[in-house]
Image (tube, rainbow, N blue to C red):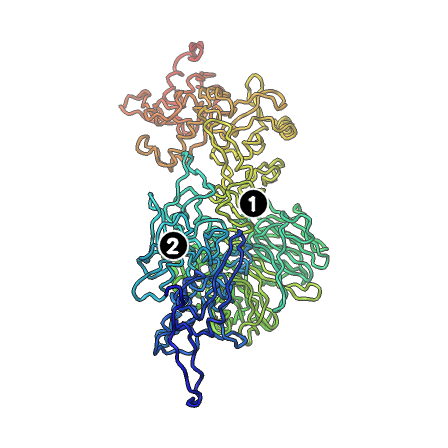
Amino acid sequence: MSQFPALSPVASNNPNEATGEAPPVTDSDGDFIPDVHENLFEDWVNQTTADGRNIVIPGLDRDDARDAKYDLDRDGLNATEEYCWPYPANCTQPGFPRGLTGLLDENGERKYLDPRVSDTDGDGLPDGFEAWMCLQTGGFNANDLVFRCPRFDPLNASEADEDPDEDGFDVDRNGIIDENERYTSAEEYRHGMPPFHVDELDGLWCVASLPDGGPFDDWPYISTSANMTFANLLAACTTNSTGTFDEDLWLGTNPMNGDSDHRAWNGVSLGRTFPSFGDGLPDGWEVHFGLDPLNRSNALIDVDQDGWDEDRDGFVTGDPVTTETGVSLGEALSSYEEYLVYNDDGNVVRSGLKHVAFGDDDTWVEVPVRLASPTANVATLHHDVRGLHVNDQDVYVLMRHGITHWAVDEDTSTDVWWPHATRLTDMEPLFVDGALAGFAVTSNDGLQIVPLLQDGSLAPMETWSSLGGPSLERALVLDLDGSSLHVLALGTNGEGGVWTIGTDLRPTGDVLGGLSPGIEASLSSTNATVTSLAQAPGIDGVPTLFVGTDRGLVVFETASARDPVLNGTWLFHFAFEATVVERNLDPLRPIGANVGDAPAEVRDLVLDGAGPDQLDTMWMAMPSGLHRMDLRTLTISHGSDLVHPGEDGRSVVGADDVHSVLVLDDAILIGSAWGLWVVDGGRDATYGARDQALLPGELASLATVEVDGVLRVLGGAAPGRFSNQALMSPVSNDSDFDGMTDGWELIYGLDPTDPWDAVLDPDGDGLDKDLDGFADDRLWSNLDEYRYIALTEDGYDSTDPSNPDTDMDGATDGAEVHAFHLSTTTLWCHYDFQMVYQCDSDVGAAANLTYVQNAPTDASTDPTNPDSDGDGMPDGWEIEHRRWVGTTFDGGNNWTLDPMRAEDALWDADRDGLANICEYQWGIMRNFALNGDLVDTHGESPEAAASWVDADPNNPDSDGDTMTDGWEAGGLCSYDATRVGVNPLNGSDALGNPDGDGFDVNLDGVLSPGEAYVNWLEFHLKDLDVVNGAVTFGEFVVPEGLNLSLLEGMLLGDEPAHGFIDDAE
């Protein structure tokens, strides 16, 4: 009987007794699946896989009840479960409340799960996996006993391209996760799957240990508990998996968790971390670079071994924990730390100048960097845009290292570089008679006035006015009467000034006017850094100066900013540390619990009104959004139409983190951390956001220019800490291919995502051959610093690109390597062959010329070893104090000190009895005294030591007290505590008498000043003589205050036949 199919009960109906209901469902084999459904799927599936295997899956047989329990397509659902969907498998039981199974498609046709195809809807997710995920995400309605799946619907193919946990990866760093950058649910399910895995043959991508199931009910474990909804999943799991560490779980990543890691290395083997997930690295990022998104341990591994042995102990210490603080403790550049570089606190968009049409129908254009596109008509000299100014068809782009002038009508651009060590911060336009005449440019080197030529280009550098000053951040032309321009420029902690400029853009009169003490005091009291400036007409006729800082906004009633008495008012202020200014964020839009580092930072101030003389509004760019100030009352408003409305019902991260504002006639352009958006309307009324094409990135500056009749919005996307010009890669030790490893760049403050910082010299330690103050005649670039190989045994490879003098020996790195020390060598003075010291302007001028023309005439020293020749004297000190020997300088002369000759330590060019090494060591004693280290041992206070001089190996009497250094030092190289009172660096010790000797001439028992045998007399006894009845000391003049009573006895008798010195050997 077993050879015959199962028998089904047979029933009949009398058509004459029918009452109008639907015809009865025919189920020939009694498996509770109607024949009509089995007929739909009765055809067999015959296919050949890509690797040549045959797929043969029988169709359903209405006469065979056994197939109801079969899972022939190995999708984890048997035929009954597939028929019942979207109801559970018990939908065929009598009394189960349900309607028709299957779902209607967009054409009104009913669809069912196909028991012959593992993935019915073709979205890359097997039916069983989708059904299980629908259950996990709350898709089962226990009241209606039906599955309703907003996601993971096995009959909805539209999910093929969806990434519900948003763990894709913005590979091109344009601010948008494109479709090809998503890490879709199908990709997550199939992660780690062999190349030719076919679900119908190989089963679900999970691992099972039948008959038992997983110990947990949550991802990734598949449970077999009594109430388990999908009982056939485990049986469908593949048997082709290798290297699994646990059982009864899905092998891919979790499509509903962006960070799926659920196992870790415990030192011996992999073990589960459940219920803890994640390693801080999004799954899509890890998958893109071939990392394991399921293994938490690899977050702290330095896969590409691009860490840097900073302490040079021979080991690169690992990162201990996946936190920002944790990875900063190690020397390795772990995968987690590389991800932090890419993420850059959310600023992942490539920095640089971009532009897009004003309106909603355009795609942004990214202006290339000149170093990357040398033949482009229009390019910027650098990617770090700090400011924009448009004058008709001339666009001026201020960047960290210079200014690019873009002539829009000619479609060309020209670049003007500043010295690499100069960091530009602001560019304020200067107008003369209503026309743009130039710019006031602030930087870490102070203020420079840069005129423009007739064609709008920047004038040559030699025509600029470099006005100096402290490091400055922002500039503003004050509204004062008269033809002169008054530029207020401020920096950090109250530093700054007011510069007066004539109409010819030359400084006039009092160039640097005194900044009002009130402004300085207000800013220094809270250590504020100025971030924005504005001046508006005041209500009472006195202009109001608004100073925006990283701590808040302070206002002053002043026209000149030079008032001797001026009080500032902080409208709002915040600092984490305690200051004299109270915290007050009440006027600002609440920013939430995470206030960030500077919630009161004022990024931009823009005045608005009916005209230049009718300003009544000021817009403020703040971390918590766009704010509006009424200039008549100084009240601040925010929220409502000034807040970004979000997209698709969700808020947009960073859209209200505002960095720049630009006011147009009928719109307000907002540059945010997310990108560009526009408020419709103006100061009279605002109507919410209007449609605008995207311009992505943290837009720190905005401008508009008309190009071919179309108004285009220019935006400077700030780089944050990193530029993201190149993709930071955890599997490449040089992500930007600039020749410097990522870890080295990161440790020394460079940008491992900037391909062009290799050619820069930000610490300015190149050569200054023309002595113009800029070390840019031959750069010692970042790449040079990285590639440096130590010259001496005590040196080490690579110099410090953030320190112009790596070994702190007084000679800059580039000068040591290129053996060029023009600025630190005194060529104007020399010794002749008889070792007579001479200084001659003509001879010195010729020596300087020869040194430059024949360079290098010196030998290279080691910039990582402060004492290249090991003689105890730093290279820089030797170079500073060396003098050439001879009558003319030809480049081959001997030197009195040579940083590559150790024997010069014992030379004594000035013949003062103190060798070079001793003169240097006496200089160290002076530093000890200044630091207070000689108070206890010698009784020398730092205040007294402040009057000491430096030891000079070319001056036999460094302190000028006419007693030679060697005699005062007692021939010693250091300050002996028993010799306190006679010191070669202290010119005031001539009249001292530290040994207390002398003669009580008047026999009164007291050694009076005139009876003391002071230092000066002890030394100059050799010069003592009596001439014409008077005591003399040859060419030496008796110092003021010296009483010669001690020597009066010499005048009572005859003059000596010869002096005391005549008997000396």
Report the residue that reaches farthest toward the left: 1005
Taking depth in this image into account, of 298 and 711 the one nearest to the observer is 298
Taking depth in this image into account, of 834 and 798 the one nearest to the observer is 798
Report the residue that reaches farthest toward the front: 1
Dots 1, 2 in contact, CB < 8 A: no
Query: What amino acid type should be assigned to the residue bearing mark 2?
Result: Val
Mark before the other along the chain sequence, 1 or 2: 2
Where does residue 443 sit, x and y in percent of width and height?
A: 55, 50
> Which residue was labeled with disc 1?
757
User: Could you tell me if residue 699 is visible in this image?
Assistant: no
Relative height, residue 241 to residue 823 (above, below)? below
The quadrant the N terminus occupies is bottom left
Query: At 61% across and 35% down in the image, what residue appears?
Result: 769
Query: What amino acid type should be assigned to the residue bearing mark 1?
Result: Asp
Query: At 38% across and 15% down in the image, what residue appears?
Result: 1052
> Which residue was labeled with disc 2?
207
Query: At 47% across and 16% down in the image, what residue appears?
Result: 1027
